[in-house]
Image (cartoon, rainbow, N blue to C red):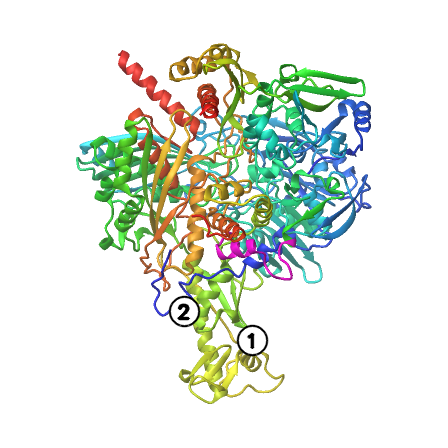
Amino acid sequence: MTETVVPDAAMIGRRMERREDERLLTGHGAYLDDLDLPDALAAAFLRSPHAHAKILSFDATEALALPGVVAVYSGADLPEIQKPLAPKVQHPQLRDYPRLPMPPEELHYVGEPLAVVIAESRYLAEDALELIEVDYEVLPAVSSTAVAVQEAGPKAHSGDETNVAVVLSQSAGDAAKALAGAPNVLSDEFFVMRGGGHSMEPRAVAARFEPATGQVTIWDGTQAPHYARQQLSVIYEMAEDDIRLIAPRDVGGGFGPKAQFYGEEVVIPWVAMKLGRAVKWIEDRQENFITAMMERSQTHRVEVGFDDDGRLIAVRDFVEHDQGAYCAGLQVPSITTSTVPGPYHVPNIAVELKACYTNMVPTSSVRGAGRPQAVFVMERMMDRIAEHLGLDPAEVRRRNLIQADEFPYKVGIMFRDGSPLTYDSGDFPALLEGTLERIGYDEARELQAKLRGEGRYLGIGLSVYVEGCGLGPYEGAKVRLTNKGRILVTLAAAGQGQGYETVYAQIAADGLGLDMEHIEVKTGDTSRIPFGQGTFASRITATCGPAVMDAAKQMRQRLLDTAAILLGCDASEVDFVGDKACLGGNLEKSVSLQQLAQTANIGKHGITLPRGIKAGLETSSYFSPERAAYASGAHAALVEVDPETGEIKILKYVIGHDCGNVINPMLVDGQVLGGFAHGIGNAMYEEPVYDVEGQPQAASYLDYALVSATEVPPVELFHIQTPSPLNPLGVKGAGEGGTIPAPAAIANAVEDALRPLKARVTRAPVTPARIVDAIAAAETAAETAGQN
Amino acid sequence: MRDQVTEFPARTEAETHTVSCSVNGAGYQSAVDPRMTLADFLREKLRLTGTHLGCEHGVCGACTVIVDGAATRACLMLAVQADGAAVETVEGLASDGELAPLQKAFKRNHALQCGFCTPGFLMSVTAALREETVTGEEQAREVLSGNICRCTGYTGLVKSVLEVAATRTGEEPAK
Amino acid sequence: MKPARFTYHSPRSLDEALADLQGYGDDAKVLAGGQSLMPMLNFRLASFEHLVDVNRLGAEYAEPTFGDTRVTIPLLVRQRQLERSEEAARLLPVLTEALHQVAHPQIRNRGTICGSLAHADPAAELPSVLSVLDATFTLVSARGIREVSAEEFFLFHLTTSLEPDELLLQVSVPRPPANQFSSFREFATRRGDFALAGVAAVCEFDETGAVSACRISAAGVAPTPHRLTDVEALVTGARPGEDLWPEVEAAARAQVEPTGDIHASAEYRSRLTGVLVKRALTDTHEKLEASRA
């Protein structure tokens, strides 16, 4: 579906099957729980059954007596590691509560770990959990932001005066004044729920201490190995080089929650060091449901002012954000506040977000990360403007879109990376028009009108979005000629299914001018490359890609220079044929990669290098973008709603996507389509419900609905490519664009379908039951109005 | 600080049962704790780690294997119940290093990303295609609906099922 | 998510199984297909000192019989096995229809008909279907054998009249008359999920196309499969058609008292029941018409 526009590229832009696949298809993947760790002990955590409670007493006597149980530690037993796990994204005004690995005194959400059992098997460890006796003093719990903002309500942390963690404000122009003077003003309240990451492989950590070297090796199914190592180095007070943290070659999905840092990651290696035994903890799904960070609700109260042609004059949005029991980082709320204006001209804007502490698992990024909520709100209001003025929703969008000749476009507010929100490139009108054309917009409107006459309810939903991606600070790569004469590309970044071993070999192949078969890619091991950040925020292609390209180009020059000396010519006369550097393309006058390695890397013990040869064929590069790039897209959904059951049938779905230049079209399509399925989950199914006591109510896949193949409709996907000027590859992120606008597109389509019935869609996910209830509410309202 | 470490005890003696079964055509005999699930038996006793545990309550399908010809959740069956059974797992699909047609189709169509759910999909679809042919997209989606994939959005999976079904019947894949 | 310890029994005959159940009484649980029990064990929502695995009682308990007057489904008949049986589809199409909507094939491959009935989840499909098929449940223990109706069998949410030492040996239903048409309609959030509500309807029609007898039962809206007797009364003697539906829907809504939960409000579930009753009855009538065409 995609074509690249990178010039002179042999491998970049090609649809390449993945190198990873063969092992994964034959059952030979190496996920953490598959690793051979002989005699590793199993860990299981005792977790708080209460949303808010004090630990009065803890007794593990019976558990310790159980045969097969090796140790039990409560938080109080490990005071040396009870140090705060710092928020990822901070704010000077944040009222931070320390998130301890296993709090010894007060617990703040159901699932918070308070003790760990180490046993010979997971079966036995779980047996022991049932034998630990804990007395709790149960405290009042905050189970929603609505409760959190009540002045006299319970407090998530005992003794606190408010549950507000921080207020984040963004503004440009004067929204209050502009709203007061606007000829039309509409407002509404939207409740947008997201959900968990639900990687099919839950989290996992294993560790083994090597007394002879003083090093601990940690296997961690994380998206951010260097970040995790840095945290551990501080908490353990160990040198970073004494901690080798490896994200296994195969990690079963990430989607955000695995980019965060958790107490279990601190406890397991520490206990392994204490016991001198390998220890493994595999999060089970029950734990994953209640303890892996998720993204939950935001409540938006939004007002829009607009002229009689539907052009926006001002947007004001008040947001309540559920931060959970601790602040693991302010990335999600910060992204929300900067995503509200989206692809539109908004002359006056004010967004105020209250992040609230609640007694639920801390929230953090999940594929989309604060953007779907903002897009939902803005796109719902675009439809409301159209309805109010009797205009076509597509036309209202057309009139407000930033045009293709306006880049770089300064929005006037800040992005979460600390830079002024500036869209680097894009063509939003082309995305919208392409999407409308492919959904058959005009015909769909005709069909809608015709079927309404037959009592059938068709709806069309549009959603246009902008996604900040490719964030800093940096990502890096090392390229080395191995002693066997192969090119080894080492990334700090760790993959969870994105196909790094293939994509970065493609990029390196172009940089080196070598065939991919000579190139190997390794990822996610802190002992192989010193610095790195991690896989999150659709950032790796735009940061690691340029680093790989640069390191590969440097290596090409090093290889050619070395070959030229051996061949007695100028480097400009040398090029590769297969794995040989040849003078003028002549295989008779060539040196192989193996020979180059022999000369410059292996050398001859005690013998001087040939004159001019530089030792050590290794290059490295770190790329730091000056600011975030902005991917963009448009979605269109054609749905039919059954007003009797509330069933939504998606009849047609079109995605227009722009992530700049594309490295491997097949993999980019895979990212977008996978993200889309996640978006459908957010739009119609997924809801991590907690009851008023803060008890999770949707903690199994019977109650929490992930979409299967029968819920995801076929999609028509097209790409446009406006290269980013911010990196030499012209690339942007592709991992989240499928997800971000889907809830808005579906909600818009459903409300559009039900317009004759006047039913309102004000929350995501939109479910059959809520649709029927909304229709009933509209009927009741009409009856009441009729009686008055 | 209370040091709650006990001496390493001798391996716990639990009541064990003997399981004899064939897995991918090879015979195995092993003593197991009766509460051990078939999935854990395959992974831990036989070290066939291609069968993955994604939910352990029968919904995600990552642990799907074929038991006596029927696709089965290995997390919802005890190892002792497989005594005398013929079990097929993902490790048995390729023969002599050559991928089976379904595996090839998955690769060609980018039907996997993280790969964690993949063995379950392969086993479910393998069993389904033995039982009946798949003639259209709707049916393909139904065949896939007992397994969850969080990465791909199912597009490549649907295509793979249709392509392999078509080569079996000798027809062009249904659109 | 690993099961707690239990003592495992694998009886090789019915007598052995009944002896085990008699011996361990309240501390024992029968393991048949395990597709509901195993998740509960893995979650440690339930644990039992003894598990009596009935899967090896013998081949005679693993095949349905289609007799002259009754269809009998013994305890080891798998759901998928019956779903794929042509004889069952011909004689008891409503059962086939419903089975197709029970979870997914991987679950139905192991799950048994009798196991699902004994589990007695009111949101499950099979209890309401067997209820409208006028099933007889055969309960056996070392003390003897007894037969009960669906109304007597299903007592409450996950609770049946099975005594701790009893086993649901088989369920049997009368062979349907030629003028009987049936339908099962459910609405679930996703394919294979437990239904937000479901309706099984069995109607006999006279020569004029009017309903001469019917049984209608709803799933997911009460602690047991819920017979909609008021609707049955309303429909008996009538010809299904547009003019009948408002009354039928109202009667259905009035006769259920569902509880709301995180998936749907009570109000939604009762409305949905009405809609599904209408659709199931429309479907039976269309099947009648098709048979006469």
B43, A143: nearer the viewer: B43
Specify few, some or many for label 2: CA neighbours under 10 Å numbering under 14, 14-19, or 20 or more. Answer: some
First of labels 2, 1 by sequence position:
2
x then y, percent, for residue A548: 45, 66
Q: Chain of mark 2?
A: A
Which of the numbered marks, if any, corresponds to residue A566? none
Identify the amino acid type marked 1. Answer: Gly
x then y, percent, for residue C224: 59, 18
Quadrant location of the C terminus of chain A? top left
Viewed as shown, does residue A273 lie left or right of C224? right
Does residue A295 appear in this view?
yes
Q: Nearer the viewer, mark 2 or mark 1?
A: 2
Residue B108 falls inside the magenta stretch: yes
x then y, percent, for residue A307: 18, 36
Residue B164 falls inside the magenta stretch: no
B47, A548: nearer the viewer: B47
Q: Chain of mark 1?
A: A
Total tally of numbered discs in the picture: 2
Which residue carries the number 1 mark? A485
Which residue carries the number 2 mark? A10
Which region shows up in magenta?
A: B92-113
Question: Seen from this angle, which residue lies furthest bottom?
Answer: A568
Please give the name of the residue rendered at 50% of the width and 44% of the height, measured from the top-left corner.
B140
Viewed as shown, does residue A207 lie left or right of C16? left
